[in-house]
Image: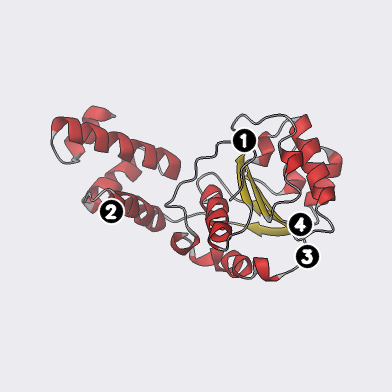
Amino acid sequence: MKQLGLPVLLNAKMRLHNFIGDKNSQILTFIDTLFTDSNSIVVMVSGDKSSGKTHLLQGCIFMAMDKQLNAFYINIKEELPEGFIAQLSKADLVCIDNIEYASDIQQQELFDLYNQIKHTQTKLIVSAQKLSTELGLLKDLKTRLSLAVNFTLENLSDKQKITILKNKMIDKNIHIDDKIYTYLFKYYSRDLSSLLSIVEQLDEVSLQKKTGITIPLIKQVL
């Protein structure tokens, strides 16, 4: 995978095979055949916070890398060199996360990229919490994105979120009783990002104290 002087840290655990959500099968099926099309394709993925947009986009990058393709993942929330987005027209796959945070200059670059790849085989996938028509984007960019293939990710159930949390802990070779997750959902948060953060924090504290993750420990940390 080529780079253009931009360090990007990908999460190796964010693969398409472990992307959660029964109702998300349609987009996974679409992505499976994405690179069999010789035309440029633009995909707009929307979904609430913690619905899995970053996981999906990074999973697509890993799939492209497995196919020895030239792929780039960009998180608009992170600092980017000016003009970087406009340099990506020769890539096989470009995934741009959180486009609702793009500055006017970055939106113009994205608009230019959209136009540059019209007659190429480049696949462009962008994500945001809302549909493109509901975002405060530049008018021309909004119009272009409204023509993209659109998918909206499902909101994960508590059971699905617990599965993700459990898998995170399995990766660390840590077992947490189900009642711990139930307690966190009831008294802390149902937001997956917040839950992942607190579980990481609890893991660090438990290692320091050389104890398991228990409800008394949660009360102490929170």
Q: Alpha-carbon distance for marks 3 and 2?
A: 40 Å
Q: Are marks 3 and 2 in contact (CB under 8 Å)?
A: no
Looking at the picture, how far across and down is residue 27, in whole percent? Answer: 60, 64
Point out the tag, 2 or 4, that comes first from the N-terminus.
4
Q: Position of residue 203 (x, y in %)?
A: 25, 38
In the picture of the structure, the residue carrying the numbered disc 3 is 39
What color scheme is it? Answer: secondary structure
Q: Vertically, is 123 above or below 88?
A: below
Q: Does residue 28 show up?
A: yes
> If you read the primary sequence from the N terminus, does the residue marked by circle 3 or circle 4 appear first?
3
- Give the left or right position of residue 17, taking residue 177 as reference: right
Tag 4 residue: 148
Residue type pointed to by label 2? Ile
Q: CA distance from mark 4 to mark 1?
A: 29 Å
Q: Earlier in the sequence, mark 3 or mark 1?
A: 1
Residue 209, picture quadrant: top left
